[in-house]
Image (cartoon, helix red, strand yellow):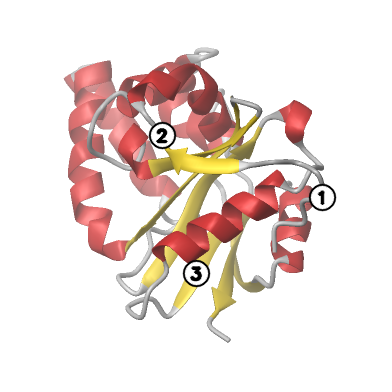
């Protein structure tokens, strides 16, 4: 499934010390959506929040929610996988982190924008295994690392409780969509977006699923 030839790749859970390598990869998985929610019109602000949240031991953006791909001792890929049973816990953790980072007044605006994004990128249901925050370092793309990472995350976490694996991809990210199709994902539906600020415009997104064979 991984498509690798002569690249030796290893996987491991992320640690808090991986922030410098992993946070840019998380951000690269959806920069427009991250800037819309967390940017507040300031360049780099979304990544600053992601770095803050990554350092925490709980939450969707926590280092504990991510795994990394390593080649030659360097982190070249990262991703997260969870299901809807964790949604409430992640939502509460995110609210606490947002208010702690932005303060109450600005934080409430960030939370409101996050809820609006959920109309386009919907949280998973309990029986969905959800892949997200998938990123590969630019210099390592085209080597099969993304395929290997997705295969690893699916095999490590999928169990009998999950009906299928799901992910969302922006319609502007045709390269990623092509990869998912090659890996056996199929397009389930298209969610239209009208979300835009001075910082970013969130594209329409496709929900794609990989069903049990």
In this rendering, which labeled residue sits more in front, label 3 or label 2? 2
**Residue 5, label in figure:** 1
> Hey, which quadrant is residue 13 in on the image?
top left
Residue 170 visible in image: no
Q: Residue at x 44, y 60 (%)?
A: 156
Query: In the rendered image of this protein, does residue 85 appear above or below residue 11?
Result: below
Q: Residue 75 sits in which quadrant?
A: top right
Q: With 205 as the anchor, is 180 left or right in this view?
A: right
The answer to whether the residue labelled 2 contacts the one labelled 1, judged by CB atoms less than 8 Å apart, is no
Q: Residue at point 77% right, 27% down?
A: 139
- Residue 112 falls in image quadrant: top left
x 34%, y 24%: residue: 16
Label 1 crowd bin: few (<14), some (14–19), many (20+), radius 10 Å: few
Q: Earlier in the sequence, mark 3 or mark 2?
A: 2
Disc sitting over residue 14 in the figure: 2
Query: Dot 3: few (<14), some (14–19), or many (≥20) neighbours within 10 Å?
Result: many
Q: What residue lies at 33% left-to-right and 30% top-to-bottom?
A: 110
Find residue 92 and report its horizontal and vertical position in percent. Answer: 18, 43
Label disc, if present, on residue 121 of the rendered structure: none
Q: Which residue is mark 3?
A: 165
Q: CA distance from mark 3 to mark 2?
A: 21 Å
SS of the residue under disc 2: loop
Q: Split into 4 quadrants, where in the image is the C terminus?
A: bottom right
Which badge, 2 or 1, comes first in the chain's sequence?
1
Front-most of 27 and 15?
15
Foreground: disc 1 or disc 3: 1
Horizontal and vertical percent for residue 95? 21, 36
Judging depth in this view, the residue of 35 and 212 nearest the camera is 212
Circle 3 SS class? strand
């Amino acid at each position: 499934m991984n498509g690798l030839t002569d690249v030796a790749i290893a996987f491991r859970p992320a640690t808090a010390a991986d922030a410098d390598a992993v946070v840019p990869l998380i951000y690269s998985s959806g920069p427009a959506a991250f800037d819309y929610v967390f940017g507040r019109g300031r360049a780099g602000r979304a990544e600053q929040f992601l770095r803050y949240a990554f350092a925490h031991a709980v939450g969707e953006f926590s280092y504990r929610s991510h795994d990394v791909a390593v080649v030659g001792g360097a982190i070249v890929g990262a991703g997260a996988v969870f299901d809807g049973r964790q949604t409430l816990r992640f939502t509460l953790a995110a609210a606490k982190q947002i208010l702690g980072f932005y303060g109450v007044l600005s934080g409430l605006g960030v939370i409101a924008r996050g809820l609006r994004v959920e109309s386009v990128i919907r949280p998973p249901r309990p029986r969905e295994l959800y892949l997200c925050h998938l990123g590969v370092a630019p210099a390592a793309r085209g080597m099969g690392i993304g395929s290997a990472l997705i295969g690893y995350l699916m095999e490590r976490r999928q169990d009998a409780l999950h009906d299928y694996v799901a992910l969302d991809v922006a319609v502007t990210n045709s390269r990623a969509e092509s990869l998912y199709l090659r890996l056996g994902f199929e397009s389930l539906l298209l969610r239209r977006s009208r979300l835009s600020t001075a910082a970013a415009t969130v594209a329409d997104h496709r929900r794609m699923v990989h069903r049990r064979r």
